[in-house]
Amino acid sequence: MNLLQMIETGAAENGFSVTGEQAERLAQYSSAVLELNNKINLTAIRDEKDFIERNILDSLMIAADIPGSGASIADVGTGGGFPGIPLAVCLPEDSFVLIDSTRKKLDAVEEAAKPLGLENVCYLNGRAEELGREGEWREHFDCVVSRAVASLRVLTELCLPLVKPGGKMIAMKSARYEEEIDEAKEAVEQLGGRISDVQKRYLLHSDMLHVIITIEKIRKTPQKLPRSFGQIKKKPL
Ligand code: SAH
């Protein structure tokens, strides 16, 4: 199977269809990131097929869970652009803000994505908990997604303040999810959320468990939250 077929089949197996053109752009982004990875560490994965499976297809696992046409989405801690870039390629009607606290990584993602000509992506350098505290980004997004950034308890304080009441956050997790959910319950409640869905999925016949946790925002986040990262780390909610 070539890379394009792998992308199309893999996405379809997970209930989401990508067009030939989207598959080509995703393959193009993969080569660009692997190339840039020689200069800046964007991913630990070096092999192209592994990259497609563990970064591209993995990101698309939540494509069907995004609210759809015209939604505004943030990817908190996008790193090498995951899940934000694959989602932006496949959901062209939605607009994406890719957030990361490391400017060098965001610049690299922007450079790798440039040839794709994505008109629905912008890049925002900053810490999620600072962007969520006040001003334009607080309670701005219909949906905030995040993969591999922090434990659910901490992640909720980073992400939920950015979500509009009525919107949701989607956390991509793995095997330890039950413990993470238990630890996060208090934080979810205090930040105005409610865990509304926990889905277990497997990617491409692999036995690695992926858990997609959806937290709906049912109330506004109290003004005193989020706190500084120092406090979040030292004394999680
Ligand atoms: N989501 C990507 C990257 C994970 S690495 C993936 O799944 O491959 C975690 C990334 O989160 C790093 O790039 C780091 O700079 C960023 N990050 C960590 N804490 C953050 C915060 N509070 N606000 C914004 N970005 C953060």
Image (spheres, rainbow, N blue to C red):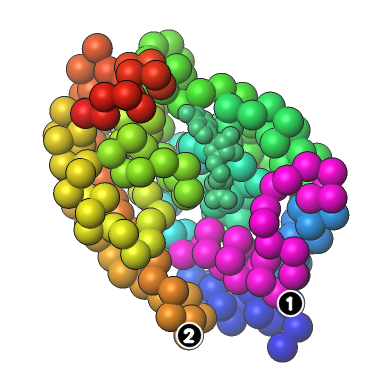
Magenta region: which residues?
36-61
Category of crowding for the residue at label 1, using alpha-carbon neighbours closer than 10 angstroms: few (below 14), some (14–19), many (at least 20): some
Q: Nearer the viewer, residue 41 or 188?
A: 41
* Amino acid found under the numbered disc labelled 1: Leu
Using residue 74 as the reference point, say whether residue 108 is left or right of it: right
Dividing the picture into quadrants, the one containing residue 78 is: top right
Q: Quadrant of the C terminus?
A: top left
Q: Residue at x 28, y 39 (%)?
A: 153
Q: Nearer the viewer, residue 212 or 185?
A: 185
Foreground: disc 1 or disc 2? 2
Residue located farthest toward the bottom when viewing the structure as drawn: 1
Dividing the picture into quadrants, the one containing residue 126 is: top right
Q: Callout 2: helix, strand or loop?
A: loop
Using residue 9 as the reference point, say whether residue 208 is left or right of it: left
* Amino acid found under the numbered disc labelled 2: His
Category of crowding for the residue at label 2, using alpha-carbon neighbours closer than 10 angstroms: few (below 14), some (14–19), many (at least 20): few
Using residue 169 as the reference point, say whether residue 7 is left or right of it: right
Seen in the picture, residue 175 relative to 38 is either above or below; the reply is below
Q: Residue at x 32, y 30 (%)?
A: 157
- Do we see residue 175 in this rendering? yes
Dividing the picture into quadrants, the one containing residue 100 is: top right
Q: Position of residue 191 (x, y in %)?
A: 22, 28
Ligand 1 placement by image quarter: top right
Q: Which circle's residue, 1 or 2, is located before the other in the chain?
A: 1
Q: CA distance from mark 1 to mark 2?
A: 17 Å
Does the magenta segment cover residue 59?
Answer: yes
Q: Quadrant of the N terminus?
A: bottom right
Seen in the picture, residue 222 relative to 212 is either above or below; the reply is above
Give the number of the disc on residue 3: 1
Give the number of the disc on residue 205: 2
Q: Nearer the viewer, residue 31 or 24?
A: 31
Q: Residue at x 14, y 35 (%)?
A: 186
